[in-house]
Image: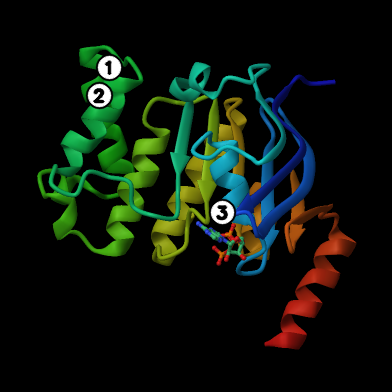
Amino acid sequence: MLKPAVQMDGVGKTYAGEVRALDHVSFQVAEGETFGILGANGAGKTTLIRIASTLMRPTQGRVVLFGETDGTAIRRRMGVVSQDCTLDPHLTVRRNLSFHALFFGLPGPRRKRRIDEALAWLGLDHCADAAIHTLSGGTKRKVMIARALLAEPALLILDEPTTGLDPEARAVVWSRLRAGAAAGTTIVLSTHHRDEAEALCHRVGVIEQGRMADGDSDALDAWFAKAAAHA
Ligand code: ATP
């Protein structure tokens, strides 16, 4: 049995004492596994992703990352792509990547090499010296993905990583995530897309009204049929 990288036990989150976004969610993600979270708008995916990436505390339950309950201990081993843009809008693309690499403790020559590679693989060379606030939404998203992967983190957490990307960029990101997984990175991602879940994930959980169920292929069929019926 592989060691769990992410372990959630009975996690609940209630906003402002009344909106119950998560209700007793329990699951494990083994080291090197890619776990997908599927769910409709408002189901609780982002809340779960924020808790897994230590950006938010649950109101109930326990989160253990690589055996640690103190999130700060593993933050430097984590790459996070949230839904909101968390880049510094007034710094250039290269400076944003550079600060992140410094935080991760990448030494100088390796830092430069990794940044150049990250800029190249997502076709960002042409805007390396542009300030973030001048970029399109999709380009900002690419920079966030490049930043999350920069230091080869042990754990990657991505909230709808390919939303807003053009098809070519989406394919590049898929291939990078697959390569990361093959190299042993543990990945947790949320998505609305079955093809994305099937292309990338070893296992999927379906979240509905804050509760998580196993997303085997029957459960996915049922969930997508229900979603189509509402469309
Ligand atoms: P989407 O697919 O639209 O991004 P989601 O599955 O990520 O949705 P969440 O953003 O986790 O869903 O929201 C889950 C529930 O918690 C929703 O009912 C939402 O309105 C509520 N919620 C989220 N953030 C807050 C907040 N800061 N304060 C109050 N309620 C919140």
Label 3: state its secondary structure: helix
Give coordinates of residue 68: x percent, y percent: 63, 17
Q: Separation of disc 3 and disc 2 at Cα? A: 32 Å
Please name the residue shown 74% across and 64% down the image. Answer: 209
Give coordinates of residue 219: x percent, y percent: 86, 62
Please name the residue shown 58% across and 46% down the image. Answer: 49
Q: Is 168 displayed left or right of 7 in the figure?
A: left
Kind of residue sitting beneath label 2: Arg
Label 1: state its secondary structure: helix
**Badge 3: how crowded within 10 Å, few (<14), some, or many (20+)?**
many
Give coordinates of residue 174: x percent, y percent: 52, 49
Disc 2 to disc 1: CB gap under 8 Å: yes
Q: Residue 131 versus residue 123: which sits nearer the camera? A: 131
Numbered badge on residue 113 = 2
Kind of residue sitting beneath label 1: Arg
To which residue does mark 3 refer?
46
> Ligand 1: which quarter?
bottom right
